[in-house]
Amino acid sequence: MTRALAVATALSLALLSHAPTAQAADPVHFWDLQPRSLRLLVSSPQVMVTRTKAGWDAYCRCPVVLAPSEIPEAMKKAIVAVEDKRYFEHSGVDVISLLSVLKGGLSRGGSTIPMQLLKNLVFHDLRASDVLSRLERKGAEVWYAGLFDEAVGKEELLAAYLNQIEFGGRDIVGLYRASRHYFRKEPRDLTLYEAALLAGVVQAPARLNPIREQTRERAHERALLVLKLMSEQGLISDKERRQAEKAGIRLGLLPEFKIRPQAFTEWVVETWGDRYVQPGETVRFFVTLNPRIQHLAEHQLSRLVKDGAVPPAYDAGAVMMAPNGRVQAMVGSVDWSQRQFNNAVKARVQTGSTAKLPLLIAACEAGKSPESRVLDQPVTGDWPSNGALGYRGWTTVKEAMASSRNAAAVRLAREIGADTLAGVSRRIGIDPGPTDDPSFILGSYSSNVMTMTAAYASVANGGYQVTPSGVLAVVDGRGQVRADFLTTMRKRVIPEECVEPTQAVLREVVQHGTGRAARLKRWAAYGKTGTSTGNADAWFVGWSEQRVFGVWMGRRRGGTGPTLAGAGAPAAYFKRIANAVNEWAERQQRLEEQRVASARLKSGYEPDAIVDWLSSLPETMTLPGTSSKREPPHREKRT
């Protein structure tokens, strides 16, 4: 009795220590954020950054985020049965389970799924084993779990828990990666027994590893317990339990899911670390990286290299971002294990004809249309040269840009003026350097993949300024939000009337111009190729379905052998990644449509209303990191 009273008193003090107090400027905490922001953060990877005396230690917790519709019902039932059997009945805190803490001490746990998710996503400073730290963490979990549960919602929160829980080390975060690691299969193919095994692993991944010989039997016993609990709670029948016990594991053939996010992690640390992490601290950066897109970007580049499309003398850098600048994938080099240099951000190289983008915008602002006439002839002697393309004489702006006619571009640039062109370049985020001669639009200056991708994103998004970002929010180990970048300001940098004409020319580049290798069968694609002098640098920057992808491939210093042009491997790389990501996004949308339609039918909605709602989805649904066209612009928020 004395022990229970002591625990109750300590827990009450911990709760009181987290009760809100009336202060002039209360700090913003994770659970204070708007529900929409919380739902985004709980489905996001995190870069864990520790500032040491020697420098930085950082890694990416990179779960593959599954939507509620992608998680098997068997897995949901198994995790609820063993971790929080009254999950769908309580409002974040299970009072009955919590009383077990008072009866048996802190070792009894009493944590619900919302409380565990808070612990895993926020309270990394309170994970010490001493009693005071555990009491403080437990008090915080209890105090805020209800708010968290209500804001995120039951289905979304359960999915977030399965996405964010560790099933064994920092590389096996989330159900998707666990399913690939232990069983070599997608989560949708898990058997009931395998779901029970994974649900059992959560308690102690090292002690209950189902594939290590020393722990296999222990994991099997734990799975039997999970199946028993599921049966007792009415989640499965006794017949299903017996069948699952007999079925055992059925291994698939898929390789383990692996990505190399080191370039992205390094960029986050170098860009935001000094600002938000003090010496000796570990701070969590919720980030914009999408591991599935990252995996596709790495895989498609590896295939090109294996097929010989990228010569051995060339390295590469690539960035995919949403139209608002949130970076979803970053490839730093052809092989990070061999060369740890982030070409996507750090390589300053000549931009080739991708630098003609400001010329297109400036020409429109000067009153010209894609069909306006321009002379394609050298200005002096044989300069500028169109190479093997030759000279066409009078042609249209659209044809000149699609065919990458340098002579026509320089004549148009001289007509518009160097200062005007430089102003447009800087407006969309490109610094062209000295601009005495307008021929800089041929790409004689240096830039990087991130900058050029952001500039093209400003055309893709309808003419708004793009500042590349990799961070959604910065949260310390006690839940305080040090900064959030969840809302963005929209500043127009391209006149509205010039967006569509510019897009039309970039569409023509892909349809009939130098970018034909980037053409997609089922989706519209836009972009521009670029090749610098001597084929030292080869580019393609463009977008499809509101996902902007910039790629550079450059010859290593002293490299010899076959050469590349932007119309070759860079454009082919764009095609491969755009097709793969678009197909994945379509599947995701179909699954979500089916899930929501099913939920509405269960709620008694009229079929006609569901049809109307589904027809509006293409306009309103977006990938993580993008914003709906119907959504009004938000005020930028920094905390």
Image (tube, grey):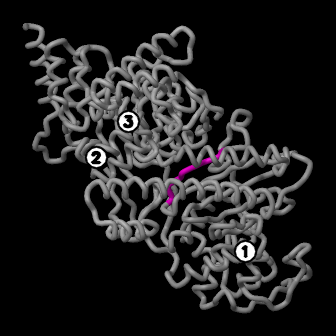
**Residue type pointed to by label 3:** Lys
Q: Which residues are magenta?
A: 325-332
Of marks 2 and 3, which one's residue comes earlier in the chain?
3
Of marks 2 and 1, which one's residue comes earlier in the chain?
2
| CA distance separating discs 2 and 1 | 45 Å
Q: Is residue 359 above or below residue 286?
A: below
Q: Position of residue 83 (x, y in %)?
A: 31, 26
Q: Is residue 397 above or below residue 351?
A: below
Q: Position of residue 192 (x, y in %)?
A: 45, 29
**Residue type pointed to by label 2:** Gly
Q: Is residue 471 above or below residue 143?
A: below
* Residue 547 in the figure: left or right of residue 220: right
Q: Residues within 10 Å of mark 2 (few under 14, many from 20)?
A: few
Q: Residue at x 63, y 62 (%)?
A: 452
Q: Residue at x 8, y 13 (%)?
A: 5
Q: Which residue is mark 1?
A: 511
| CA distance separating discs 3 and 1 | 46 Å
| CA distance separating discs 2 and 3 | 15 Å
Q: Which mark is residue 76?
A: 3
- Secondary element under disc 2, as helix, strand or loop, is loop
Quadrant (top left/top right/bottom left/bottom right) for the N terminus: top left
Q: Residue at x 57, y 43 (%)?
A: 264
Of 268 and 173, the residue lying toward us: 173
Q: Position of residue 123 (x, y in %)?
A: 32, 30
Mark 2 vs mark 3: in front: 3
Task: State the image quarter where residue 367 is shown.
Answer: bottom right
* Residue 384 in the figure: left or right of residue 251: right
Q: Which residue is mark 2?
A: 153
* Residue 107 in the figure: left or right of residue 310: left
